[in-house]
Amino acid sequence: MNKSFKLHIVLQLILLFCIYLLANRIFAQFLAFEFIEQKVNLELSALIEDEQTFLTDTINSKTSFFYNRKFNSLIKCSVKHHLNNVLCVYFEKKPIDWTKGTESNSNSIKFGKYLINGTSWKIVGMKNKTGDYFLAIEESEINSMLEQTWELRDYVQSRILPLMIGLLIIFSFYLSTRIVNIINKIKVLVINTDIKNLSLSQHLPSTFNEFQPFIEVFNDLRKRLKASFDQSSRFSSEASHELKTPLTILRGYAERGVKISKEGSNQQIQFVLMGEEIDRLINITDKLLILARSDAGRLEIIPCIVNLTDTLEQLALDAETINADLRISKNIQKKVFWECDDQLIHQLIYNLYSNASKYNIPGGWIHFVLSETQGTITIEILNSSNNVPSDLPKKAFDRFYRGDESHTRKIEGNGLGLSLCQEITKIHGGELTLEVNAHHHVSAKFRVKNNKSNSLLKI
C-alpha cells in the first residue's frame, strides 16, 4: 500500500523533534546542575568571608542567589563567635577530603562533602588568623533548587509544547507541499512530452539547482528518444513504400493467374489464396504507413463534410448482407454531418465494425448507434462475444495485440486495426474507448466535438 509523502514528512519531523527535546532535556539538566553547583560555591564562599553571616541569624548574601532564601539545613560553625552545632564536631574532628577553592584576603577557602547518618552534606571551610569557620548545607536542598528550576521549565514547556507541535505540523505540510509541487512540475513536464516536442530542451520552472541535473538527464534522454523514434518511423515509412510496389505487382500476377487457370482447378485455388495473402500484406503496409506518418506527426487530413448518417446506414445494410448469421440492429440519428477526413473516418468505422464481426459468436448480434447531443457526435458499435480477455479494455489499442492467441489465431487480422483507429481519433481531436460488460458484450465508442465553424488543419 502506498504511503502519504506529506504524512511521512510530518511524522519524521515530529519524531526528530521529540528526540531533540529528549536530548535537550538531558543535556540541559546536566548543565543546569553544574551551573547551580558553581553558583552555590560562589555564594557560600562570599558568605563565609562575610563575618556578618556568623553574627546574625539571617543570611544576607552578597549576590542574589541566596538572597531572602531560607535554608532549613544551613549550619554555621565558628569557634570565635561561639556558633557550634552537634554536627560541627564531625566537621572539626573527622577527616574530610577537601578540595581547594578560591583565595582572597589571605583566606584559604576549601570545599568538601561529608556523609552523616546517610545524609550528604556540602561543606565550605575557611581558616584565617581569627580561627576556623565552617558552613554546611544538605545537598538535597541544593538539588531542590534544581528541581524547582526544572519544574518551572517543565511548566512553561508543557504550555508551549502544543503550539510548537502545531507549528511543526504546519511547517511540515508547507515543506512537503513545496517539494511535491516541484515534483508535480517535473511530472507535468514528462506528461507533456510527446513526439512534437522531443527535440526541444525543457527547463524546470524552479530556482532550485538540485533538480537541474535531473532535467539535463531528461533532456538528453529526449534527444536520444527523438533520434531513435525518427529512425524507427523512417524505417516503417520507407519499408511500407518499398513493399507496396512489389506487392501490387504480385497481386497483378495472382489475378492474372486466376484468369488463365482452369476454372475450379487446384492451380486456380492456389492463385486465389495467394491473392488473398497479398491483399492482406498490402493492407498491413497501408496501415503501417499511416501509423508511421502519425508517429512522425506528418499525417495529413483532408477535411470535407461527411454525412455520417448515410455512412452508418450503408454499413449496417452491408453487414446484413455479408453476415447473414448475425442479427443486425441500429439506432442511427438522421442528418448528422461532420467536417472530417472522409477516407480516415470511413476506415475507423469499418475497422470497428470489422472487429465486431470477427470476434462475434455464432448467432450473435451487432448494434450500430449514431447520435449527436449538445454538439458531441457519438458513434458506437456493440457486439456479442465470449471469452473476452480481462485486459482487453487496457491493451486493445496496443499494436499487434490480439488477446488470447488460443482463441484468435484462426481469426484473420494483425492487431493493427484498433491502433490505427486510435491514431485517427487523436488527429480528429476525439476520444475512443472500448468497454466490456458482465455479459461479455463489447462496446467500441467514438466521441468527438462537432465544431462546424472550424476547418480541420494539418496536424
Image (cartoon, helix red, strand yellow):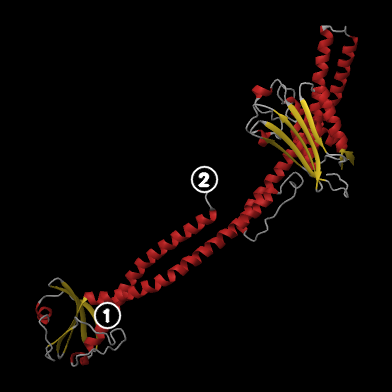
Q: Is residue 365 left or right of residue 174?
A: right
Residue 324 percent location from the top left of the image = 79, 21
Tell me if residue 296 can be seen: no
Q: Is residue 302 left or right of residue 162?
A: right
- Give the residue type at disc 2: Met
Residue 5, labelled with which disc?
none
Tell me if residue 45 can be seen: yes
- Give the residue type at disc 1: Val
**Residue behind mark 1:** 40
Question: Which is more toward the observer, 429 or 135?
Answer: 429
Q: CA distance from mark 2 to mark 1?
A: 59 Å
**Residue behind mark 2:** 1
Q: Earlier in the sequence, mark 2 or mark 1?
A: 2
Residue 378 percent location from the top left of the image = 78, 41
Q: Is residue 213 left or right of residue 47?
A: right
Whether 132 is drawn above or below 170: the answer is below
